Amino acid sequence: MRTMCAAVLGFEAVVVGLSVLVMIRVNDVEPTSAAVAGLGLALLAVVTAALLRFRWAYGLGWAVQVGAVGLGFLTTAMFVVGGLFAGLWVLAVVLGRRIESAR
């Protein structure tokens, strides 16, 4: 489960980091606000991926998903992209648990 969730968070960090450019160029969000929100969430995703050996870090992973969807208030495309990553997170958690229990 940890590997699948870490992969989701890793890819999500890249996409959320790139969303900063979209926020600035397309949606005219102030660069400082876009950088703090986008890069801060990307950093949180990377740190969370590294901490997944601890059980409590999965709760932090859920917070990253909420934050990714919440970026939709700065750029509406993130409602869709954040929702997709939230779906991938749910899939990684559910399938990861099933695989671990089968072992």
Image (cartoon, grey):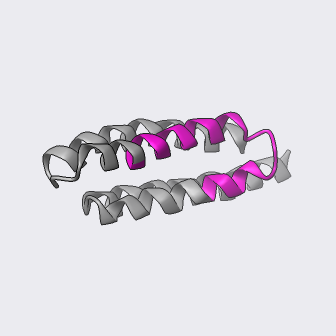
Name the quarter where the N terminus is drawn: top right
In the displayed structure, 18 sits above or below 65; it is: above
Q: Position of residue 90 (x, y in %)?
A: 59, 60
Quarter residue 5 falls in: top right
Q: Is residue 83 visible?
A: no
Quarter residue 49 falls in: top right
Name the quarter where the C terminus is drawn: top right
Q: Is residue 40 magenta?
A: yes
Q: Position of residue 44 (x, y in %)?
A: 56, 43
In the displayed structure, 78 sits above or below 18; it is: below
Q: Is residue 52 magenta?
A: yes
Residue nearer the viewer, 43 or 15: 43
**Residue at position x 76%, y 54% in the image:** 97
Relative placement, left or right, of 45 versus 60 is left
**Residue at position x 63%, y 52% in the image:** 61
Relative placement, left or right, of 83 versus 2 is left
**Residue at position x 25%, y 63% in the image:** 76
**What stretch of residues is rendered in magenta?**
37-62
Q: Position of residue 79 (x, y in %)?
A: 34, 64
Relative placement, left or right, of 40 versus 100 is left
**Residue at position x 15%, y 52% in the image:** 28
Q: Main secondary structure of the magenta part?
A: helix
